[in-house]
Image: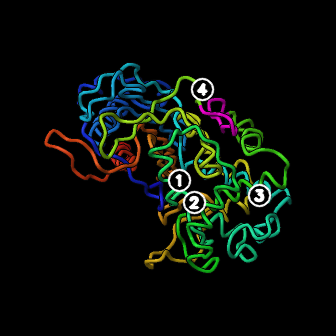
Amino acid sequence: MKTRTVLLLLIGAAVLAGLYGCGQMQGSAGFSDMFRIKVEAVFKESVARNGFPGAVLGIMRASDGAELYLATGMSEADDTTAMDQRTWMAKTAMTTDTRFRIASVSKTFTAILILKLIDEGKIALTDTIDKYFPGLVPNSASIEIKHLLTMSSGLYDHESSPYIEDYQFKGSLTQYFSPEALIGYSNSYGGGTVKFAPGANYEYCNTNFTILAMIAEKVTGKTYDQLITEEILTPLGLTSTVAPSAADVNMPAPFAHGYQPPDSASAWRDYSVQNMSWDLGAGSIVSTAPDLIRMIRAVYNGELISAAMKTAMMTPPPITDMTGKPSLYGFGVACSADGTVGHTGANPGYNAVMIYSKGYYYAILGSAGMLSKIMTPTGEVTAVTSVSNILKDVSAAVQE
């Protein structure tokens, strides 16, 4: 189901190359024509090869702020009844200001919110869950805020519970889930136990960030959407980004329709209309490529938090995952040895990446989801791909 590691799965269907023959380019000041043409060609080819109906790319050069934004494919298909996605035609073309559900990229927003509250002295990294919600989860007297931020709590992921998985693929998509209900799914899925002691290991768990959102609401008396708007969106001028309220099911226009391939059905499913309460704090935010470029620049430069919190955010703890691999996860961001910092995300219908790497900021948003079973001209096959593949292709072209 939903992401269990920082690198996330996506569908890998082939799409008619002609579908991507027209696209949109804007905001490309500061880059040469040759650079723009090269990157656009690589981006369009990669989007088609990786099976997205449409996608948007944003690039900013850190040294001088030069920007490039590209859109390709469709933001809405005219008919999705054909299992073979390559036959689809565009009802609405993708544009560079199109909004997407950004899935787990939302975790970086939540982490910044929590670090701001720490800077303000309202909470502390060593506060336990019990300080705010006694007995909320197993080990709540020992799990600290720093364990939630670094995915080292040992909790079970509520989004891996059978109920939430069934709801996401078969439910109405407009049901509201209270935070307490989500925690209940985590507790029941784990049978009232934890996987490991707090801080002992790394394991990706969306429930960590739902609890962080609950704590932020508790100490401020405000809702998560109010806090994200007041503490991050307004200060950074992210006017196209939205943290949905508990009642929201629609994205502001223009938005991308996100499609999820069925295991066995006559049509793909559109996930653009849904209540994101099931992903509170972990993956509910809606944004655009230009806004995500602004956000990752602010994160990388520490614009909203203290220098001490920035350093802590980008310093993964010296722990390993359950297989012995070192953790690369700081506070709501993945951090690699070469200085790369960012996050990816995938939910049904949507895939995203927001990252800094080797002198450039990148944002890529794709309008397709997470299943790896896809339809090809010769029948259904299993293929694993990700929006990260597009980033790999584009960044290689940028660095040439």
Tell me which segment is drawn in magenta.
238-249
Name the residue at 59% across, 30% down: 250
Q: Which residue is mark 2?
A: 158
Callout 2: helix, strand or loop?
Answer: helix
- The picture places residue 86, in percent across and down from the top left corner, at 24, 32
Is 25 or 398 nearer to us in this picture?
25
Disc on res. 258: none
Query: Please, what is the three-letter code of the amino acid marked with disc 2?
Result: His
Name the residue at 44% across, 46% down: 169
Query: Please, what is the three-letter code of the amino acid marked with disc 4?
Result: Pro
Callout 3: helix, strand or loop?
Answer: helix
| First of labels 3, 1 by sequence position | 1
Q: In the image, is residue 214 part of the stretch drawn in magenta? A: no
Name the residue at 13% across, 42% down: 378
Asked if marks 1 and 2 touch (Cβ < 8 Å), the reply is yes
| First of labels 4, 1 by sequence position | 1
Is 63 or 2 nearer to us in this picture?
2
Would residue 136 be found to the left or right of residue 325 on screen?
Answer: right
- The picture places residue 208, in percent across and down from the top left corner, at 63, 62
Name the residue at 56% across, 23% down: 253
